[in-house]
Image (cartoon, helix red, strand yellow):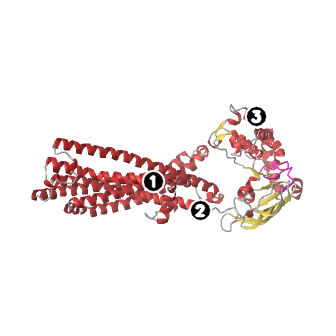
Amino acid sequence: MEEQVQGKIYDRKLLGRLLQYMVPYWPAVLCALVLLLINSMLQIIGPLLTKAAVDRYLVPVPEEISSWWAAYLSDDPRTGLGQLAGIYCAIILAGLLLQYGQHYLMQWTGQKAMFRLRRQLMDHLQKLDIGFYDRNPVGRLVTRMTTDVDTLNELFSSGLVAIIADVMMLSFVIVVMFKLNVGLTLFLLGAAPFVIGATYLFRRAVSLNYRRIRIALAKMNAHIQEHVSGIAVLQLFNREARSQEEFEIINRSHMEAYKDTINAYGWFYPVVEFIGMLALAGLLAYGGYEIDRGTMTLGVLLAFFQYGMRFFRPVQDLSEKYNIMQSAVTAAERIFLLLDAEPGVRAPADPKPLSSEAATVEFDHVWFAYENEDWVLRDVSFTIEPGETIAIVGHTGAGKTTLMSLLLRFYDVGKGSVRIGGDDVRDLDPTDLRRHFGVVLQDPHIFTGTIEGNIRLGTDGIEEEHLTAAAEQVNLMEFVRSLPGGFSHPVKERGAGISTGQKQLISFARALAHNPGYLILDEATSSVDTETEFKVREALNNLVEGRTSIVIAHRLSTIQRADRIFVMHHGELREVGTHAELLARKGIYHKLYQLQYREQEAPLRLNSQ
């Protein structure tokens, strides 16, 4: 629905917000407008020079010979025509320089303004909560940052100025034409209603098609992003043809919308051109009649022909610029909807500082639902003492990862509270809160850059020896030494060329290098092979030492040494105890353990046979 926002062509508040991005560059804008004004005035002089050449030298008339500027022209026809030609050339050259300066200044201003807008958008996107990204496809957000911003750039760099230029040109042309001959001016203006009617039909058709293009483009970006990111799955399951069929539908809707737009442009310009030529033909007949009567000079008629071309061209341009304005205002409305989106999780006005000392983590009767009252967690309560290592296990969908999302305040609880050191996490600044946690996720994300950059993640305070020590402790150095550039080895997008296990080791080194007070391992060993898991298990002892650690695990073999194990089932905390205690209880944990034991034993039986 957001893609279908039409936007008013004139929305004072919206245009006011847009113009704020140009305020810092007002000297350049003012200079461009001055150049534009001078150029528009110069464009008016050309037909007057034509009139002077005809009425003074080619078909002399007393009125022109005695005009106020006749004193500056030679009486000799050859010399006088040369002077007028020189002035005409000077005006053309001056117009060229003025247009270059005006276009350069506005393009420069547009790029500066869009740079500020993109930076603001990126900053805002990084502050929005995770729930926002659950509701909005990445492709749509990419459209906001690229296509919509480019549409605004066209408005800033050419649209607004072109509209002002066209309005100036029309105003000056009409004023001068009225001064030259009222009858011919009224004759030309008689064609205006037909041009306005064609413009109205054109604008309505193009506005509808532009909306279709925007919808198709947003869908296309979302489809491309999703299917390129999941290209391995597509190829594994031979779904390329199906993906191509889906893309074909979206791509065709985009093409059809563009074809209809081209069709609208295809008939509009010839229609306006036809009306203009028809008006000029009538002007020729009417002017010839007036010349024959002696009430008009040939120079005036020729000047009117030139002014007629200057009259209809801005009308055509205004129609096109109207659509630029329509698209830009609509793009601006969608961009500002994004900028006005408030994060669901915010820092309090007066946040409490989180002590660097280890503190108790407490979940107090916590309820949580991602949507409405479809509860994912139900009345969960537990306490984690400082320095304690806790493991959380349970079936898929039991709420294990949700617990950590609430602790890190990616979401706020529905009922109850989560406290650290007695302070509710909602009273803490999320940035300060997360600074104390080291997190290793099941699916590690590797950024484009270097191995070192992926461990540091922009933290300059990590010394070189700490970086190396962290890599040594998680058994990453063997891999780093095998690379040509070591820590400076370039990493491609999403860590292409690096195995999943190696990515996981980089994530472990990342967590350890930042020396957090609290550690969260979310299925951290599920993506590594058995040999790497043994290496990681050795490193876990270094990771958890002296830290409050929470290990979410599917492989129960990795959490048997935990101080306590929490067993989640259907969003509830059902069992708490050590590995031995829970096995002895013969409850949910015992069943999970038996299931995994059978899974591990099954291959052995097959091999023995």
Q: Nearer the viewer, residue 401 or 309?
A: 309
Earlier residue among tags 3 and 2: 2
User: What residue does disc 3 label?
Assistant: 478
Does the stretch in magenta take in 300? no
Earlier residue among tags 3 and 1: 1
Residue 449 position, x and y percent, is 64, 40
Rendered residue at 57%/62% (across/down):
340
Residue 67 placement, left or right of 239: left
Say what amino acid the circle numbered 2 marks. Answer: Ala
Spatial CA span between label 3 and label 2: 46 Å
Residue 343 position, x and y percent, is 64, 61
Residue 403 placement, left or right of 119: right
Neighbours of disc 3 within 10 Å: few (<14), some (14-19), many (20+): few
Which structural element holds mark 3? helix
Mark 3 or mark 2: which is in front? 2
Count of numbered labels shown in the rendering = 3
Which structural element holds mark 2? loop
Mark 2 or mark 1: which is in front? 1
Spatial CA span between label 3 and label 1: 58 Å
Q: Which residues are magenta?
A: 545-565
User: What residue does disc 2 label?
Assistant: 341
* Label placed on residue 29: 1
Q: Does residue 161 appear in this view? A: yes
Which structural element holds mark 1? helix
Rendered residue at 68%/36% (across/down):
488
Neighbours of disc 2 within 10 Å: few (<14), some (14-19), many (20+): few
Q: Nearer the viewer, residue 196 or 176?
A: 176
